[in-house]
Image (cartoon, rainbow, N blue to C red):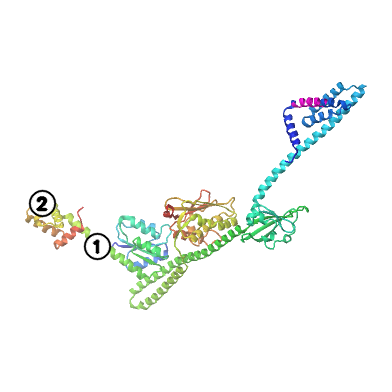
Amino acid sequence: MSRPDAFAFIDSTTAKLMRAPWAGYPLAIGAVLAALGIRAALEGFGSFYYLPMLPAVMATALLAGRRETAFAIILAVAANVALVHRDSISDTVANALLFASVAWLISEGFWRLRAYRRSTSELSRRLGRRDHMLQTILASVPVVTLDRQGIVRSLTPSASAILAAPEALAIGEPFSLFVEDFDLKAFPAPCPASAATGLWVGRSGEGKKLELNIQLGLNEDETDPDHAILCLTDLTDSHAADAHAREMHAQLNRVWRLNSLGEMAASLSHELNQPLSAAVTYLHAAQTDMKRAGPVADSAGRTVDMAKAQLLRAGEIIRRMRELLAHESRGLDVESVGSMVADLHGVIGMIGRTGAVEIRLQIDDDNDIVWAERIQFQQAMVNLVRNAVEALEGREAPVVIISGKAISDEAYEIRVEDNGAGIATADMETIFRPLMSTKSGGMGLGLSVTRTIIDSHGGVLKVEASPMGGAAFSFCLMRERELVDA
Amino acid sequence: MNSITVLIAEDDAAVRDSLLMLLRGEGLRARAFASGAELLANLPDEPSACIITDVRMPDMDGVEVVRRLKDLKGHAWPVIVITGHADVPLAVQMMKAGVVDFIEKPFDPHRLLEAVRGCLGHLTEQEGERQNRQEIAERIAQLSQRESQVFRALVEGRSNKEIAAELAISPRTVEIFRAKVMSKMQAKSLSALVRMGLASPPQ
């Protein structure tokens, strides 16, 4: 505030006078009396009429309102008429009118000035607030400004954090020090309305590789040294998260292929073993009958023996194939449900986005240490979530809730439920059987594989109607309590 | 008359039918049911049946059948499990639950028949013992009160003199009662009589 103190005094006095409306009149009287005093003092140097009164009126106008000023003018005119002898009435009236109008004009000038000053100070206050807000926003946004040569002129704290370069060091350096081959001309010609963006690979002051999205805005003011404004977005972490999700997805896919092959083999072997058993047993019964026919049937009996041996061989082949494809359980380990599910965030997010479904995670991290085979558990979770999302196709406001909490000292329960159409009671048992899909696209292995996984964890996969309206699949894992107590 | 039968729980119709044909061809009495629940509902009161059950069946699986058989009627039923879906944990679980044999499908019928015969032999033995016990109980019931007192005392290993003193009769009278007991119980020797007494303790 480099404003002269006199102005401040005038402002504050004016404000006070405005609040106390009658205080202006004594001021006017005082000012006129003072002017009269001055005039009396100057009497020896010559004759002064109205001129000494002018400062009194101006002072009143400066500090008080129109009424007080008018009052001061009347006082001054009255004093003059009383003190100065005029030859004619017309002279008296003409002088008084001249004084009054000149004094009023000057006062009017003062008031205009005052109103103007008030509006500018209001404007500058508003500007100050805007500026403060902008500074606050900028502090959280990584912004760098460059001059025409690509030299850094300023950078916000968050930009300095991304580039790992202190403000003092970065300013004055070319921006290409941080982002290799950075060139303002490499951006597509920005139209003034919207900024141009581009992806760049940068290197932080600590040598870390950065993946940056840079939004460029060019200053149209040719005289402003801040020529280019760059808004940085650090994509490094989100790219790393994407890569993790992709890796997880690939890993789950591999496990899924093995699991579903194993499930197919198990299912096929069960289905084939039934008719094979029946055939062998029938043949044996036939042999028993043949023996009653005596030695005549001996040769036929031997042939039947050979047929039986071939059927048993088929059974053996199936058994070997199943053993080969059986899911190789690496055994259960002590795991945390929270961490196993956290690994899946990316994949679950991907499934949710594909189906345009909102997926809510409500996993209780307390007492979540359980016995589980990490990747198999994750496979089961993804299967259940994918099923739930697919069941929601075409629904309004589709939601899937994945929840988990310890329900007793021994068990941690996991639930996956949706607000879809649910599962008919009649289908509740058959949905778990392999090759029993109710979906047109599915092989019908998902739930069957999931159940096999849950079985191998010593749990039971249950299905019931969810309070949300759709189906609720749930199962329990065995809690590892000693670790928690320790 | 042999009341021993083979009861089968198997959901696959062809396997069920072929098993019946096999067992009946061997001259055994057999009945088959399409589910575990049906089998349990038709269980005889006496443990006079050998049971063959599948594992993977709708509604009630073989594991559950074995578990319920254990709880039912207080007898240990001889159970043979046949399954087209065998793995080591299941086999261990079944053997622990006390099944007689665990056979993978497709099986060699000889192997199954052997197992069934083993069960039936065991059951016949049990049945024989049971009949024997019943006969002894009938004979004991024919003894008079005094004869019965002498019989129990003999089983407990007392001498004639001790018995005489205890029952306040002469040793000579004890000897007459003892002869009567031996004859009524159809015991050829004192040791045979004691065995009968031990096999049928007083109620």
Q: Quadrant of residue B150?
A: bottom left
Three-letter code, disc 1: Gly
Give above or below for B15 relative to A39: below
Image side of residue A269 versus residue A148, left or right: left
Closer to us: B187 or A83: A83
Q: Label 2: how many residues lie within 10 Å, few (<14), some (14-19) or many (20+)?
A: few
Residue on which disc 2 sits: B167
Prevailing secondary structure class for the magenta stretch in the rendered image = helix
In the image, the segment drawn in magenta is A23-36
Residue at mark 2: chain: B
Residue A35 on the magenta span: yes
Asked if the stretch drawn in magenta spans residue A463, the answer is no
Instruction: Mark 1 and mark 2 in contact? Answer it, CB < 8 Å.
Output: no
Residues A117 and A307: in front is: A117
SS class, disc 1? helix
CA gap between label 1 and label 2 equals 36 Å
First in sequence: mark 1 vs mark 2: 1
The residue pinned by badge 1 equals B128
Q: Residue furthest front?
A: A44
Q: Secondary structure at mark 2?
A: helix
The N terminus of chain A, quarter of image: top right
The residue mark sitting in front, 1 or 2, is 2
